[in-house]
């Protein structure tokens, strides 16, 4: 298999060298060129034909957001990973870049004096994302071509499902844009509360909640500890905290904790799904959108066992078919749908209407 061709775009000589050195050390990746700003990156695109671009945000002449827009205007679908800072401004710019068509982001190591620490941070964050976005196996070891898995069966039902009393959603890579397309299509009169885990660091989640709130008829808030669960409000897990449902004498509430990461994530989807099954006695509708890894699969198994319903995004419309794919391949999905059909499925399940036939509509590999 040919190495993944990467172009590194950053105005900092030091960052370009760190990223180039880290990526070049991986046998599956080849850095085919660099650029000091977005304008040069766009000019080099046709000549270098990279499989993926890493893009800084703040650069002279043409910044990263403008460069993403310019690349997408050429009809290029090349995956773009933004380099972001863990600041309010960095978070806002990163969300702008994702809206403009970037696929993913990594956060720059903050206040790290040592080059070796910076390199380790880039290696841990960036390489798995590059491989996932270019469809390579993320496992360690020699890469080999993998045939797309056969279409998984829709999970058979052992008994009647329960009408959902809560909607829980999990997403990761590609999730911000997917959520920005799903939540605005849900009505303000949604009959249940919504809890949402998107893998994101602190600062980002607060800004992302504000953006979703502006886009959607629903009320979207960054979750706080001890909020009552009311219909039509979406609670987004804050960065670095698991979000769970807690039963209290005053009724069901949100709970936040900093328990150990699960599936290498905090917030993670599994703790939310598990707690919702317990609190709502299985009357749960779970939706899992695009994302790397398999977070949510174990929780989906518990939701199905408790009488709940699981809907996942299909492969063709997912940026990375990791999380939804893990559930589909474990035969834990009631429906596998393209992104634009998920809002209708949510409304249908919340109304207590189940599809007459197994509505599996999986697309081919991306």
Image (tube, rainbow, N blue to C red):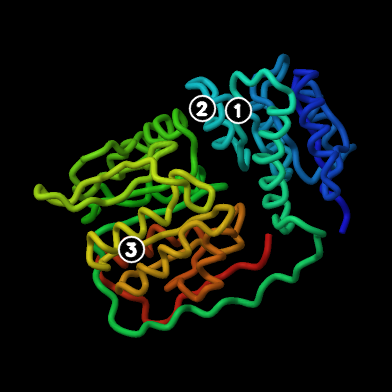
User: Cα distance, mark 3 to mark 1?
Assistant: 33 Å
Judge whether 193 appears above or below 102 on screen: below
Few, some or many C-alpha atoms within 10 Å of disc 1 (few <14, some 14-19, many ≥20)? many
Q: Quadrant of residue 271?
A: bottom left
Question: In terms of sequence position, does the residue under pointer 2 or pointer 3 come before the other?
Answer: 2
At 77% from the left edge and 31% from the top edge, which residue is drawn? 19
Q: Residue furthest left?
A: 249
Residue 136 falls left or right of residue 305? right
* Quadrant placement of the N terminus: bottom right
* Quadrant placement of the C terminus: bottom right
Q: What secondary structure is found at the residue carrying circle 1?
A: strand
Which residue is tagged 1?
84
- Looking at the picture, tell me which residue is in the foreground, 95 or 181: 95
Which residue is tagged 3?
285
Q: Position of residue 77 (x, y in %)?
A: 71, 46
Question: In terms of sequence position, does the residue under pointer 3 or pointer 1 come before the other?
Answer: 1
User: Cα distance, mark 2 to mark 1?
Assistant: 7 Å
Which residue is tagged 2?
91
Question: In terms of sequence position, does the residue under pointer 2 or pointer 1 come before the other?
Answer: 1
Q: Quadrant of residue 208?
A: top left
- Looking at the picture, tell me which residue is in the foreground, 233 or 168: 168
- Mark 2 touching mark 1, by CB under 8 A? yes
At 46% from the left edge and 44% from the top edge, which residue is drawn? 266
């Amino acid at each position: 298999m040919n190495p993944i061709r990467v172009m590194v775009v950053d105005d900092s000589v030091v960052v370009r060298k760190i990223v180039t050195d880290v990526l070049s050390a991986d046998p599956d990746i080849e850095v085919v060129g660099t650029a000091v700003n977005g304008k040069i990156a766009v000019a080099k695109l046709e000549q270098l034909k990279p499989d993926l671009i890493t893009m800084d945000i703040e650069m002279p002449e043409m910044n990263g957001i403008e460069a993403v827009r310019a690349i997408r205007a050429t009809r290029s679908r090349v995956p773009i990973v933004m380099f972001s800072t863990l600041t309010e401004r960095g978070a806002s710019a990163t969300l702008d870049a994702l809206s403009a068509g970037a696929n993913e982001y990594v956060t720059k190591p903050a206040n790290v004096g040592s080059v070796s620490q910076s390199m380790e941070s880039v290696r841990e964050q960036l390489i798995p994302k590059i491989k996932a976005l270019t469809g390579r196996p993320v496992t360690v070891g020699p890469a080999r071509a993998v045939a797309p898995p056969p279409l998984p069966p829709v999970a058979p039902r052992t008994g009647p499902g329960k009408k959902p009393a809560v909607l829980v959603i999990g997403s990761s890579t590609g999730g911000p844009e997917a959520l920005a397309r799903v939540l605005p299509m849900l009505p303000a009169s949604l009959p249940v509360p919504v809890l949402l885990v998107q893998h994101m660091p602190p600062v980002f989640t607060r800004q992302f909640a504000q953006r979703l709130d502006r886009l959607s008829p629903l009320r979207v808030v960054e979750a706080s500890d001890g909020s009552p669960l009311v219909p039509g409000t979406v609670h987004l897990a804050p960065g670095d905290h698991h979000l769970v449902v807690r039963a209290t004498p005053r009724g069901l509430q949100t709970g936040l904790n900093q328990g150990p990461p699960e599936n290498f994530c905090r917030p993670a989807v599994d703790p939310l799904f598990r707690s919702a099954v317990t609190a709502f006695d299985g009357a749960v509708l779970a939706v899992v959108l695009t994302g790397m890894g398999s977070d949510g699969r174990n929780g989906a198994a518990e939701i199905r066992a408790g009488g709940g319903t699981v809907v996942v995004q299909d492969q063709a419309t997912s940026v990375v078919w990791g999380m939804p794919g893990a559930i589909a391949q474990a035969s834990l999905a009631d429906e596998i749908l393209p992104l634009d059909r998920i809002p209708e499925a949510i409304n249908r399940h919340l109304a207590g209407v189940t599809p007459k036939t197994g509505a599996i509509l999986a697309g081919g590999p991306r």
